[in-house]
Amino acid sequence: MSDRDNAIADPRTYSDEDRIHAILKDLRDNDPVHWTAPEGFRPYWAITKYADILEIERQNEIFHNEPRSTLMNIQTENDLAAMWGGPDPKTGRVSPFRTLIDMDGEDHRAYRGLTQAWFMPGNLKKLEARMHELAKRYVDLMMEKGPECDFAREIAVYYPLHVIMSILGVPESDEPLMLRLTQELFGGADPDMKRQDAEGTVGTNTIMDFFVYFNKMTAERRACPGEDLASVIANAKLKGCPLGDLETASYYIIVATAGHDTTSSTIAGGLRALIENPDQLAKLKADPSLLGSAVDEMIRWATPVQHFMRTAMEERELRGKTIKKGDALQLLYISGNRDEEAFPEPFKFRVDREPNRHVAFGYGAHVCLGQHLAKMEAKAFFKELLGRLQSIELAGESKRIQSTFVTGLKTLPVRYQLTA
Ligand code: HEM
C-alpha cells in the first residue's frame, strides 16, 4: 500500500486535474501495468497506456466485464451485496443491476443486439430535427439568463437529460427525479452530490428508487407500447421470452445514466476548453466544418468516463508482468487519452486534431452504444451556440466532480454575449 495507490483510488484526486494527470503520466512513464493496493479496496492492476487498454478490450473473451466492472471500495461492495442478497453465487457480481456493462460473451451480444440498430446513425437521423430544436431551446435559455450563468449547472446538465429522457419516453415532469438519481449514482463520492439520508450507504436507496420507477415503466409499456426506446426494451424478446425484470430495469438504467452525465460533461468541458484556448474558439467559429473533429477533441479532452474494469479469465503476460487468473484490471481511459505515444502533444486542445482515435468511448465489444448519439447532441449544441456567440469568458472558478468513475465540471461560471 502506498500514498500513490491511495491517491489513484481516491475520488478527491480526480477533482484536481493537474494532480491526477501528474500521477498518471508518472505511471505511463515508469510502471504502466501497476499493481495497485489502496487501503479499503481489493487490489488491481492500473493500466495507463493507450495500446494496453486497446489490447485488453480487444480480447474480451479473456478479459471479462463481470464481476468487477467499476472500481468500488470494499465497504460499498459489501453494502451493495447486502442490499439484494448478493454477491451472485455464479459470477460474484455485487451490483444489484445487470446491465450490458456487467455482461459478457453470448449474453452480452444478445442483449446489445436488441437496441444496437436503434443507436446507429441511420436510425438516429430521425432525431436530428428534434435535437436542433432542443439545442436552440437551451441556447435561448442561456441567452435569457445572460450575461452570466453557471453553464455546468444551469445548461449543460439539462440539455442531454432532456434528449435522453425524450428518447426513453420519461415524461418531462419526472426529469428532476431522474437528474437527482443519476447524479447520486455517479457522483456518489462527492459531498455536493451525496444523498442526505440516514443510511449513509452510497447509492443503495438511489438504486431502489430507480428500480421502482422503471419497473412501473415496464408494466406500462407492455400494456400500452409506444414509439419510444422504453417500449423497444419492455417488449423485446430473447429466444421467444420477454427479458427478466432485472435485465429490463437495468437496460433503462444504463441508457438513462450512461446517456446523460457523460454528454453534459463533454459539453461543459468542451466549452471551458474553447474559452481557455481562444485561438481554437476563433478557428472553429471561422470554419464550422471543423465541428466534427472539435467534438471528438472535446470528448478526448473531457474523457467523462475515466475508467472501466475487467477481470482476467486466464493468466496473461503484459509488459513483463504476470496477470493471474481472477486479477482485476482498471482501464484508465483518462490516461490513455493523454498518452504521448498515441497523441502528439496530448495536453494541447486542438479542434482540428486528426486522426483522433481516442478511447473515451472504450473499444471492442463493449464500445459505447450511444457514441453516435452523444456526438450528434454535442454537435447540435455547439452549432447553435457558436452561430450566436459574440463573446465569452470565465466568470469564476470551475470545479470538477469528485469521482473515480464518471466525472466532469460541476460548476462553470461564464460571462457572455449571444445574439437571438
Ligand atoms: C460523451 C459521452 C459518452 C461517453 C464518454 C461514453 C463512454 C462510454 C464508455 C467508456 C463505455 C464502455 C466502453 C467499454 O467498456 O469499452 C460506454 C458504454 C456504454 N454507453 Fe456510453 N458514453 C457516452 C454517451 C452515451 C450515450 C449518449 C448513451 C446513450 C444511451 C450511452 C450508452 C452506453 C451504453 C448502453 C453502454 C454499454 C455498452 C456495452 O457494454 O455493450 N453512452 N460508454
Image: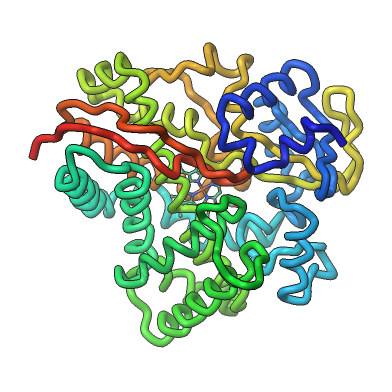
Q: Residue at 59%, 69% (x, y): give it.
A: 207
- Residue 169, located in which quarter of the rendered image? bottom left
- Residue 271, located in which quarter of the rendered image? top left
297 sits left or right of 283 in the view: right
Q: Which of 399 and 388 is in front in this view?
A: 399
The reply to whether residue 312 is in sight is: no
Estimate the x, y position of residue 237 in percent, counting from the top left. 54, 74
149 sits left or right of 60 in the view: left
Estimate the x, y position of residue 16 in percent, counting from the top left. 57, 32
Q: Nearer the viewer, residue 27 or 413?
A: 413
Q: Residue at 67%, 20% (x, y): give it.
A: 25
The reply to whether residue 148 is in sight is: yes
330 sits left or right of 2 in the view: left
Quadrant containing the C terminus in the rendered view: top left
345 sits left or right of 284 in the view: right
Q: Is residue 49 above or below residue 142?
A: above
Q: Nearer the viewer, residue 329 or 195?
A: 195
Q: Residue at 46%, 50% (x, y): give it.
A: 261
